[in-house]
């Protein structure tokens, strides 16, 4: 797949306003279609639809979305991990637009955000195609980590603060990437860019999210 194809493949698309707010009584045929789609997804084993619409927190992409940055004891982290926490905390509290992280490019920017954070943390990535610190495609991001011996498939590794989580096309939100802030007992808290167009923090159980590919180790 070309880099241009990759760039366009991992945009997170929120549901329509009507779907999120549960309008009813106007288009009965719509609910029949929705019901058939849900049945089809369930039959295929894709049960992640509920993550798009959490009744307690409708803006959550997966699990629970936080409106505050998590309290992290950096005394237990190494210097690089602590720097990643500091950089992501700053960006969460005062985020930029996608162009800030993508060198002005107008494109899906989740991998750009990861690349930008790593550069700011003193551990820049290296695009295997261009050599640049910025890797705009999730497939290329995985290729980079694999080429450096730092890619760990899901289920083979316990993630740590600063690791990069990568999702494939079959995840509930498509191809995506974000950064692990905390991890324990199979539950992670992540921060990612381009999550409904924002820099967002989510907490969820890894086992409950299909389509996770693996981790890029810090």
Image: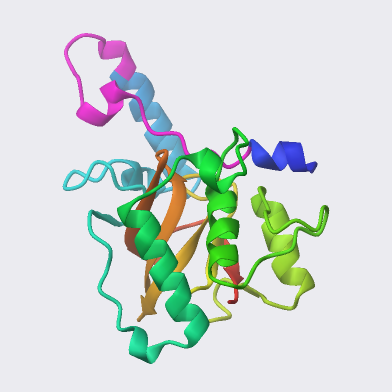
43 or 206: nearer the viewer: 206
- Residue drawn at 57 percent across, 39 percent down: 108
- Quadrant containing the C terminus is bottom right
- The quadrant holding residue 149 is bottom right
Residue 24 seen in the figure: yes
Q: Is residue 11 magenta?
A: yes
- Quadrant containing the N terminus is top right
Whether residue 171 sits left or right of residue 206 in the image: it is right
193 or 24: nearer the viewer: 193
- Residue drawn at 52 percent across, 80 percent down: 80
Magenta-drawn segment: 9-30
Q: Residue furthest bottom?
A: 76
Rendering coords of residue 188 (x, y %): 38, 70
Q: Is residue 187 magenta?
A: no
- Against 7, residue 201 (above or below) is below
Q: Label the magenta part by its dominant secondary structure.
A: loop
Rendering coords of residue 210 (x, y %): 48, 57
- Residue drawn at 57 percent across, 57 percent down: 116
Rendering coords of residue 211 (x, y %): 54, 56
- Against 24, residue 1 (above or below) is below
């Amino acid at each position: 797949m070309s880099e241009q194809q990759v760039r366009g493949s991992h945009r997170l698309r929120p549901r329509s306003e009507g779907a999120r707010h549960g309008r009813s009584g106007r288009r009965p045929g719509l609910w029949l279609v929705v019901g058939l789609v849900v049945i089809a997804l369930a039959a295929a084993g894709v049960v992640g639809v509920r993550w798009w619409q959490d009744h307690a927190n409708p803006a959550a992409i997966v699990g629970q979305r936080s409106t505050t940055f998590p309290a992290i004891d950096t005394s237990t982290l190494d210097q690089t991990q602590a720097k990643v926490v500091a950089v992501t905390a700053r960006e969460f509290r005062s985020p930029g637009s996608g162009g800030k992280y993508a060198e002005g490019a107008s494109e899906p920017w989740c991998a750009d955000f990861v690349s930008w954070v790593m550069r700011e943390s003193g551990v820049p990535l290296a695009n295997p195609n261009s050599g640049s610190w910025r890797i705009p495609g999730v497939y290329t991001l995985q290729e980079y980590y694999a080429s450096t011996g730092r890619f760990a498939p899901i289920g083979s590794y316990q993630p740590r603060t600063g690791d990069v989580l990568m999702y494939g096309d079959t995840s509930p939100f498509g191809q995506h990437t974000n950064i692990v802030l905390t991890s324990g007992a199979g539950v992670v808290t992540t921060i990612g860019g381009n999550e409904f167009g924002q820099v967002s923090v989510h907490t969820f159980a890894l086992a409950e999210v299909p389509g996770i590919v693996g981790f890029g180790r810090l």
